[in-house]
Amino acid sequence: MATALHLITKEELIAKFKEIESKGWIENYRKGNDGAVGNILEDLLGIPENNLPIPNAAEWELKSQRSNTSSLTTLCHVEPSPRALSLVPNVLLPKYGWAHKLAGQKYPVDEKSFRSTTNATSFTDRGFKLNVNRQEQRLEFIFDSSKCSDRHSEWLKSVEQRAGLGSFEIIPYWGFNDLYTKAGTKLLNCFYVLADVKREGGKEYFHYNRVLMLKRVNMDKFIDAIEEGSLYVDFDARTGHNHGTKFRIAFKDIPKVYEEVIEIL
């Protein structure tokens, strides 16, 4: 078994992936653990958590997930520009936020929330959308009040009072170069592993049967993934605390943003 003190080659690691695949269905013995797929894979590989024992390990990571998941994976955190204005806590939350679902319970009665998972292909039910502006080389967060669902009519009335129903006075945006700098340093080369899942006799089993080697994030592909709606911007702020603006993608779509995709299994 490999340990943090014993380096193995990428070829040896690939051989281990193939050996694990040949074992077939493996019982989930880490019940109640959201990261069970990854934890069990690390156990099977004989490696410490998040510590690949390979040369240039700082440039590589191991990503694993259930093949049937629809959950989004965070790629990086990047606040919108102009950053000096802190647009999320100073504009989006006070002018476009809504009552927090726990206002008056866990939080004060006037607690507001601004949470929006937004892509570039469709408006949210509150009228938010991403716009890829290739001419100005930037990704924009836009608002169109005419796209707001009737079920948010009261919220829309409050927005009219707080900010008006026109477009944002200052458009929140991310420059392509800024995104490249952030994503390029945050997203490492990775071994990307999917596991099929089955339940039998009250137990859950994993079969690690798809492994890709992903090399070098490609910024053109990153922007393409945004434009086609595969990559989302996720705002998550409440009064007094901005949890950060995340760029997120479905696990199955992660290979789309890499320059080189090598199929191992």
Image: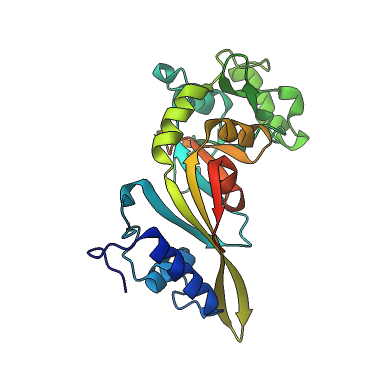
Is residue 110 depicted above or below 33 in this figure? above
Q: Is residue 136 left or right of residue 34?
A: right
- Name the residue nearer the viewer: 59 or 25: 59
Q: Residue furthest bottom?
A: 201
The spot of residue 41 in percent (x, y) is: 44, 68
- Name the residue nearer the viewer: 110 or 22: 22
Q: Locate the C terminus by quadrant.
A: bottom right
Query: How is the protein colored in the picture?
Result: rainbow
Residue at the image position 38 percent from the left and 72 percent from the top = 43
- Name the residue nearer the viewer: 119 or 126: 119
The spot of residue 62 in percent (x, y) is: 43, 56
The spot of residue 233 in percent (x, y) is: 56, 35
Is residue 236 depicted above or below 33 in this figure? above
State the image quarter where residue 13 is shown: bottom left
State the image quarter where residue 78 is shown: top left
Residue at the image position 75 percent from the left and 28 percent from the top = 147
Residue at the image position 31 percent from the left and 69 percent from the top = 2
Is residue 123 depicted above or below 258 in this figure? above
Q: Is residue 79 visible?
A: no
The spot of residue 76 in percent (x, y) is: 45, 39
Q: How many marks?
A: 0
Is residue 37 depicted above or below 236 in this figure? below
Q: Is residue 133 left or right of residue 38?
A: right
Q: Locate the N terminus by quadrant.
A: bottom left
Q: Is residue 25 visible?
A: yes
